[in-house]
Amino acid sequence: MSNTSHYHDLIIVGSGGGSMCAALYAASRGKKVLVLEKSGYYGGTTARSGGVMWIPNNRFMKRDGVEDSFERARTYLEALAETFEDAPGATPERRERFLKEAPAMIDFLVEQGLELDRVPFWPDYNDELSGGCKTSRCVVAAPFNKKALGEWADKLRPGFLDLPATLDEALAIPYVKRSWAARKVFVRVAFKVIGALLTGKRYVSCGAALQARLLQAALSHGVEIRLETAVRELLENNGRVTGVIAEHNGKREQLGASLGVIVGAGGFAHNQALRKQYQPGTNVQWSSAPVEDTGDMHLELQRIGAALAQMEEMVGQPC
Ligand SMILES: Cc1cc2nc3c(=O)[nH]c(=O)nc-3n(C[C@H](O)[C@H](O)[C@H](O)COP(=O)(O)OP(=O)(O)OC[C@H]3O[C@@H](n4cnc5c(N)ncnc54)[C@H](O)[C@@H]3O)c2cc1C
């Protein structure tokens, strides 16, 4: 393997939502950014997801006259966090930082040209708690014609709902036999599908639309994205991470990053050994996360001394 061959300001591992938001932000501030993605698809689990972002006190709530505030959302998170007070990912400082930065993140994404909107009805999962919201604090991306991505269109990971329909329209359709409102939605979506077929548009929605919009904005700022490129090692110098060793087509390359490396490499849903260690009795076959989420970066971060926490936690649902 050769010595460091290329230098960037920032290297980002993985192309999920967290990674791409960081990539876009850094590139919009003039930084040279490289995203390394192990899969042949761009977009991570995020592209496969509902793409529903929980953002209290966001600009769309203000627009719609829905009451919310930093304090109200903090009260809700405090009530929720009571049961896991010792979780390092949810300390009071982190909760406050999230509540301050999340609406600012949405403002930034809108300024960058991403078309986002509020989900009209998506109550907080524990809306009975003090500070809970009974309508919706959630934001999603508008459906997107992925043909606008050019050669990247077929590299976007297929989504949850590859249709010209918003999430609330999709959720109404199963009630078509029971409700006139749902029938109206069905007809509207059917017209949009026919329109797309006639005009050759290829719509994606939900998480795939979010990832497509982030990709379009990131590419316009010159972010470089390499697919089928797995990060194998994090390189350290005097206690700082200064680069990575990445592998593409069996060939390893050393890449430098002057500002550091951001790891957004997903979870370990597809690593049976880690499941056995942290979540005994669960199985990789039960996961709808992409197969590339194998926790290799958890192990690599641990090797260089990072602390792991809340490894027993997971989100599970029948599907
Ligand atoms: C069906 C479904 C629906 C969901 N709906 C929602 C929702 O509506 N709202 C919500 O908040 N959450 C939802 N989730 C959860 C949410 O999608 C994930 O928590 C989130 O997308 C994780 O984002 P991430 O950026 O951390 O990682 P990911 O999106 O998983 O991205 C990680 C990327 O890193 C890559 N990678 C891994 N290892 C390496 C390596 N060594 N080198 C280079 N690349 C690597 C992977 O290939 C992957 O592309 C849903 C999940 C699923 C499965």
Image (cartoon, rainbow, N blue to C red):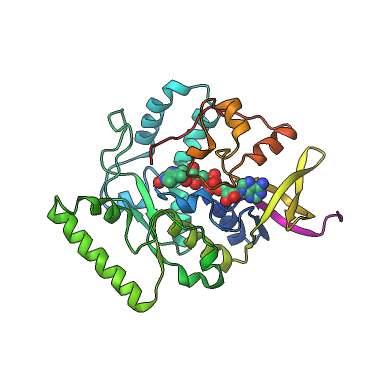
Question: Between 140 and 56, which is closer to the camera in this rendering?
Answer: 140
Q: Position of residue 80 (x, y in %)?
A: 39, 27
> Relative to residue 164, is residue 277 drawn left or right?
right
Q: Residue at x 52, y 21 (%)?
A: 86
Between 310 and 294, the one lying in front of the other is 294
Q: Choose between 70 and 300: the one closer to the eye.
A: 300
User: Is residue 2 highlighted in magenta?
Assistant: yes
The x, y position of residue 113, in whole percent, is: 45, 64
Query: Where on the picture, by quarter, is residue 274?
Result: top right
- Name the quarter where the C terminus is drawn: top left
Residue at 33%, 35% in the rendered image: 125
Residue 284 is one of the magenta-drawn residues: no
Residue range in magenta is 1-12
Specify the quadrant of the image occupied by residue 131.
Answer: top left
Residue 119 visible from this viewpoint: yes
In this picture, residue 117 sits left or right of residue 24: left
Q: Residue furthest bottom?
A: 199
Q: Position of residue 176 (x, y in %)?
A: 18, 54
Q: Is residue 80 above or below residue 73?
A: above
Give the residue displayed 49% in from the left and 32% down from the top.
314
Count of labels in the image:
0
Q: Position of residue 261 (x, y in %)?
A: 69, 47
